Amino acid sequence: MPEYSPKHFKLPDDKVLPKDEAKGILPYVFTDAMAIAIDVALATNRPLLVSGNPGCGKSRLADALAELQSWSNFSCTITSRTRLESLTAEVDQLRRLNDAQTGRLGKPKDPADTDAGRPDAYYLNPGIFWWAFDADSARRRGLSAAEARSHAVQLRHPGIARKPRRGQPAGAVLLIDEIDKAEPDLPNDLLEPLDRRRFDLPEGFRADRKGAALTSIEAPVHKDYPLLTLITTNGERDLPQAFLRRCVLLEIPDPSREALIEIALRHEPAGNRERIGAIADILLKLRDLADKQRVRPPGTAELLDAVRACEKLDIPVSDAPDSVWSQLERAVLAKDPALRLRQP
Amino acid sequence: MSKICDRGEIHLCDLALALKDLPWTDPTQAAVIADCLGFGLAAHPKSIATSQGHKVYDRRSTSSQPAPDKPPAREPPILVPPTPLRPVSLPADTLPSRLERLTTLAPPHQQPPDWLEKRNAAFPAAPEPQLARATLLPERTARHVLSAGLSMARATGGIDLAKLIDAVCRCRPIRGLPRRLEATLDRGCQLLLDYSTSMIPFWEDLEQLCAQVHEVVGAHATQVYSFDAQPTQARAWTTSGEPLPWRPDGRPVLAATDLGIQGRGAAEPSPDWPALAEDCAKAGSPLILLIPWPAERWPKTLPSATLIHWGPRTTAGMVRQATRPSGQEG
């Protein structure tokens, strides 16, 4: 396949996000398949569902793209306790009750500039979707600018805020990590925020936007504010068909030996190529073994850990059972007992 | 076009938009674009495909467990007809022959000829095995689908703290403790089965549905009625054989029917259905229609009820989506 040049985002000629130690940026090697999938997701304004073995770089793809485009970056790791409200907007009922007890609660029509009472929206905790759709409003919990000043509401940005490049619109990458850990209903609950880039506030609550009291939070149109929602899955649980049918799909395959070496050398440019090759060979053997043993195979992330440790501590790769390398291998690459026992 | 593409599932419009917009230069790149949108041969990547089981990392599984063997070569089915014998070449000349009247009509052979025995051996003496039949509501989903469709919300759950605090904070009088809504099946249901001629292909499914509803809701809470084309004339039968006419009583009404359309897209439903829906609405009984034909074939004028496709791919999520009040559509 000839090289693909994406239209909706800029990719360096070598398709690599370069390492920048001063800024704490790690390198990332893009493939043509990734470039096409991201471009398709941006062109069609659909979420990108990324699958692949653990440690293959699914979540890092979001960071790398945000860094490359100078877009803001928001991320949220899903657990079995994650609910739609925690991702959109949640009411801090305890604080509200406490304020009601202490008489600090405001009536809905209290003037905004009095210190006596707090308006309803003061108790809204913005979730990651709110931040990604309308960060300014989320920072003020949906209060007007005057109310936010009056009540000293100025929340911290939960992700990485980046200024857009000159002449380019501000954009954002929203990472919903490990969707397969969610309760079965959550992916269906996400259909509206993902589809329409909009969600409703809890009943009875309003958010201010240019003087209007809105019952829902909505992202600006795509051309003014490109927003890529990147969802990752390890495939541990089935996702609903309705959800899958709304996503652009990208599967990141396990990298080949050459790709592993290239990735490792991007991370450790001064690394010993031979040693990295030897570690990559061991990783590939362990992958085969893991496949037979039906255990989790070590991923690229583990390879990078091993390479970094070997480079920093100058550990040679060795077959000797009591060598330092064998200890390192057990600690970093062959974490699963099944891989240690069966290793030749 | 982009406005249309922003909504709902990915469809051809998205593919057309992507192919028009993106700078692909090679058919392989176009194929990858189509793959990303689910239009390729490998529509769903292996790790998120739902038809196959996911790879599960299970520490308990070791290599001592035998790897799943390849399935043995399939034996020919028992009821294969015998291979026809090769035709015997006939002599070119016509042999002389004559007709004789038989004195008795007894068969020339008392015992069946060997060749007949041999051919019959292909048919087993034991009764034919019952072949598995694909059902409209498979066992693995039946419980979830029926629970989702027949459960009613009742305020019997834990205290709804959010509502309580909201009332306190707004200085509203609290006349009763607000409780969380719970889905419950304890009201039971009325099951209306359509045994009209257009439903003949699904009669076995009707029987199976009846058994499944009994299992999920409980036989004691399920009242089964049957009808022939006219649902308002549905009857149950008492043990003494007396007909018991159907009346809605506030319980959910589940009707399995094809609305008389016989799978034809343009057909209109029987006028009895709006009357049934009206009766249910008056009694406060939610009406759920299980229709064995896909939504594309449903009539354009439909009774006001929750319509669910009665098919093996129907899931509880789809039922919940269909039964959700229109204001809460997601």
Image (spheres, grey):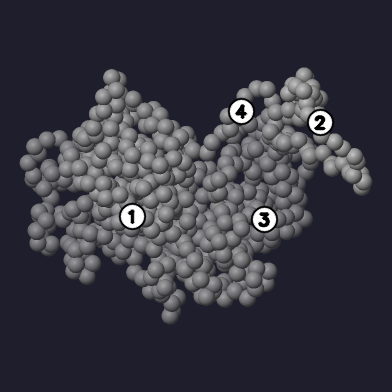
Secondary element at image label 4:
loop
The answer to which of B107 and B296 lies nearer the viewer is B107
User: Helix, strand, or loop for circle 2?
Assistant: loop
Q: CA gap, disc 3 to disc 2?
A: 89 Å
Give amino acid for label 4.
Answer: Pro
Q: In which quarter of the image is the C terminus of chain A?
A: top right
Q: Residues within 10 Å of mark 4 (few under 14, many from 20)?
A: few
Q: Which of marks 1 and 4 is nearer the N terminus?
A: 4
Q: In this view, does B297 lie to the left or right of A268?
A: left
Measured in 3D between alpha carbons, the distance from the residue under mark 1 to the one under mark 2, in whole angstroms, is: 68 Å
Q: Are marks 1 and 2 in contact (CB under 8 Å)?
A: no
**Label 3 chain ID:** A
CA separation in Å, label 1 and label 4: 40 Å
Q: Mark 3 points at which residue?
A: A255
Mark in the foreground, 3 or 1: 1
User: Would you identify the image quadrant in which residue B276 lies?
Assistant: top left
Residue for badge 4: B129
| Residue depicted at 78% across the width and 26% down the height | B102
Residue B197 picture location, percent across and down: 40, 42
Q: Are marks 1 and 4 on the same chain?
A: yes
Task: Find residue B268 and name its label.
Answer: 1
